[in-house]
Amino acid sequence: MKKYIYLFFLTFSFLFVACSPEAEDIFGENAATRIEERLAADKAVLVGAQNGWLMEYYPASGQIYGGYNVLAFFGEDGKVTVSADITGDATSKATSTYRMKEQAGPTLSFDTYNEIFHIFSDPKNDLGIGTAGKGMEGDYEFTIMEATAEKVVLKGKKTGNKIIMTPFNESWEDYLNSIIEMDGKISRLAQFTYTDGDFTASVKQSYRTFIVTYQENGEDKNVTVPYIMTPTGLRFMTALELNGKKIETLEFEDVGDDGQLVSGEVVLTPKFPLAYFLINGEWFFSYKNMGELGQLYWAAVKRQALDPNGINLNMAFLTPYSSSQMAFYWMCEGFNDGYLFFNVTTLGDNQVKIVFALSGNQVGIDFYQQLGWNLMIYPFSKGTTGVTFNLSADDEKNPSVITMTDTSDPSNVIKVFKEAISDPFDN
């Protein structure tokens, strides 16, 4: 009996050894063939759109910059031509290469630098969008989740964002012009209000997102919803719900002086708080347009620190850093740019409180400790005490000059300008 068992296992072992290499070769060949066939089929779909694809592109994993319209034409030769609304120029196009490869699934990669497409992933894009050293944190490599002649679904390798592409049959330039024109109408509307009976919501914009604030059961709620521009308005990435009403799109209605956004019975009415414009824009300083207190302290810094060290202040301005902070940013010849952070609290539509946050970059800290920058920032923060300013402007709906008036000291008045000012001590 033992002999028969031994012979059985011996025979089985020979069969297994004899058959295994052939089975592995067949399996490997089939897998490689399937991968190549899938990549070839996906490329055929991309190339098959004779006028290219419309891509709804959302950079950053949290979609904090909203969505953008990207038009892309894929050639059989491995080249891709791109145009996008983010440039603000409907005629602008850039051509680079793309690559199809297997990388944990079929992958589409924009593998050489494209001046338009890589705006979304460049750590320091020319538009200045995003945090320093990170940019908009978008993808340039995508897993192909679905590819048909009607729709291509991509998933960002880094962000995991879902990207939809559909074949595009219209004029690229006409379409992007309509998007850019609509963006101009909507982006200038800083904030909105929505009222539905006893329900009230405040809406403000940050890039292409809506930040919605309302009360629910006595508690403040904040909801951030990214959107993408359309020729007639905007479309949310996911539906926005306000007081039980689901909103997927908003249409721009050109009524009154400023227009409004509408979806059925839902109407968002624009408002223009100067606090919003101040916190969300870059505003430049001019020595001649500071009050008595500001000129006193800035002159002391120039006399005691800048002039003796041969330092020239090229530019100084306030710039947004986060939803609750601004930076006092400056440029001096022979130094890297410096900045110090300030906490900014909105006390009303036209009133803010600014408090020094005791932080900044290394250049900022060095200037603060060694070159009298504690005096430089005193007029708009008074150390860590903070200053409350009333705000007024030359044009409340589209300000180019904002006047900041200290509520506790009439000698502390500061005018800041939307237009860049060089050599602020001479202007």
Image (cartoon, rainbow, N blue to C red):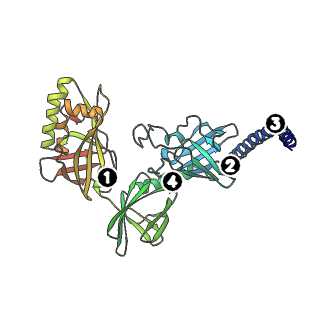
Q: Amino acid at mark 1?
A: Phe
Image quarter where the C terminus lies is top left
Q: Amino acid at mark 4?
A: Ile
Which structural element holds mark 4? Answer: helix
Q: Which residue is mark 2?
A: 49
Q: Nearer the viewer, mark 4 or mark 1?
A: 1
Which structural element holds mark 2? Answer: loop
Q: Gap in Å between the C-alphas at discs 3 and 2?
A: 50 Å
Q: Earlier in the sequence, mark 1 or mark 3?
A: 3
Q: Gap in Å between the C-alphas at discs 4 and 1?
A: 23 Å
Q: Nearer the viewer, mark 3 or mark 2?
A: 3
Q: Residue at x 49, y 44 (%)?
A: 87
Residue 277, label in figure:
1
Instruction: Name above or below for residue 216 compared with residue 131.
Output: below
Q: Residue at x 61, y 46 (%)?
A: 143
Q: Earlier in the sequence, mark 3 or mark 2?
A: 3
Q: Which residue is mark 4?
A: 179
Q: Position of residue 119 (x, y in %)?
A: 49, 40
Which of the pair 66/80 is nearer the observer? 66
Q: Position of residue 32 (x, y in %)?
A: 74, 40
Q: Which residue is mark 3?
A: 17
Q: Residues within 10 Å of mark 3 (few under 14, many from 20)?
A: few
Which picture quadrant has residue 109?
top right
Q: Nearer the viewer, mark 2 or mark 4?
A: 2
Q: Gap in Å between the C-alphas at discs 1 and 2?
A: 43 Å
